[in-house]
Image (tube, rainbow, N blue to C red):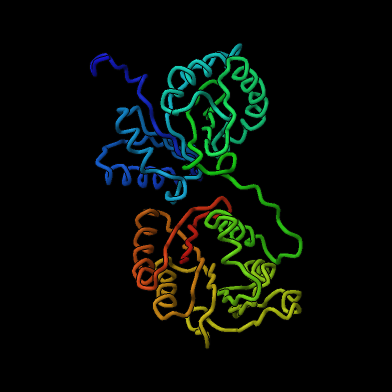
Amino acid sequence: MTQEKISLSDLPGVLLYCRPGFEVDCAGELKSVAEDAGILITPHVEPGSGYVFSGPMESHAHATLRAELTWENLIFARQLLFGVFATGSLPAEDRVSPVMHIAETKVLPHAGSRGFGTIMVDHGDSDSGRELSKFCDALTRPMSNAFKRANLLEKPTPGHAVPKLHLFLINAGHGFVGFSDLNAAAPWPLGIPRLKFPSGSPSRSVLKLEEAFLTFLSPADREQHLRDGMRAVDLGAAPGGWTWYLVQCRMFVTAVDNGPMDAALLTTGMVDHVQSDAFKYVPRHAVDWLVCDVVEQPARIAALIADWIEKGLTRKAIFNLKLPMKNCLREVLDCLEVVAKSASRQGLRVHAKQLYHDRREVTVIVIP
């Protein structure tokens, strides 16, 4: 088929899920990665929708982005789909058949497999998207059964991961169909880990730290980096959500905050409460972990963490950058550059992610 005969409707796109309100930042990050790879794209942004779509694009550009993009290395994306095509209007009497046709004739050739491992019916994390949750759940079983009857499902085998098919619905009659590459996608539905607030924690902020460790560290990494007897400093600790989580990991924690700590935490014998300013406290000896959820300008937090790393006061760190109202991506990248300079001199790596339990903030980890 010649270039002129290729219809735009036959060319794939890329779809990213994100936190509603951060579509512009997500699109900017996607565009930057594409430009670094020599590809010019114009992502479609629908403010408040919880998704960003870029396409249609030439197959070589799609293949390049598939090689360059991973969910782990994108800050503002919760999930990442390739081989994405718009559904057009889905008739109420049969939404399954047109989706299956698109999946078989358009999506599957880009997926590199004989079928799909499972079928996901997704929605955005926006107000309108969440209203579709029950509808998506009800559609999943008939979709899966239809794909099974059509021999479009493939079982994974050792060493052979099978992509998932996703129908992302904008509303009951329109959406996108694409696949997630298991080597590049988030492991949770919608890219959202469902965590239960633990009884005993002094605050819900504990969920941010738990999600951070799940996101940034593999099970083997968690076994290595969250060992019994490690020592940590929690800057801005009160009332103690992050300190509580570290204590559950059997770490000894210096909780730095002028405010009061949870009384039960102080009875564990594993917490030393130091009433001090987070920007003035200096430990006597280097610690294994520095954690920080202080509400402060992101540039000031970045400089503080970089200083601790530069002076060798901590071996690892997790901290949050509270985001401004505009130019969030630029602010985050500037802060990461400051931290990365000190981290690289200590042989450490920096990763950042806007987590589900974050709000207007981005979580950053610094590890060997």
Q: Is residue 49 above or below residue 8?
A: below
Camera-nearest residue between 295 and 147: 147
**Coordinates of residue 175 in the picture (x, y in percent):** 50, 25
Among all residues in the image, which is located at the extreme top? Answer: 93
The answer to whether residue 120 is visible is no
The x and y percentages for residue 160 are 52, 35
Which image quarter: residue 200? Answer: bottom right
In the rendered image, the residue lying farthest to the front is 158
| Number of dots carrying numbers | 0
- Relative to 194, is 100 on the left or the right? left
Residue 201 image-quadrant placement: bottom right
Q: Is residue 204 left or right of residue 9?
A: right
Query: Can residue 51 be seen by looking at this rendering?
Result: yes
* Residue 278 position within the rendered picture, expressed as x and y whole percent measured from the top left: 52, 78
Q: From this view, report whether residue 9 is shown above or below residue 289.
A: above
Position in image of residue 305 (x %, y %) = 44, 72
Query: Above or below — where is 62 with respect to 272?
Result: above
Query: Based on the displayed image, in which of its 4 quarters is residue 83 positioned?
Result: top left
Q: For the point 39% across and 77% down, which residue is it? A: 310
Q: Quadrant of the N terminus?
A: top left
Q: Residue at x 58, y 45 (%)?
A: 192
Q: Is residue 324 left or right of residue 261?
A: left
Residue sitting nearer the eye, 81 or 168 = 81
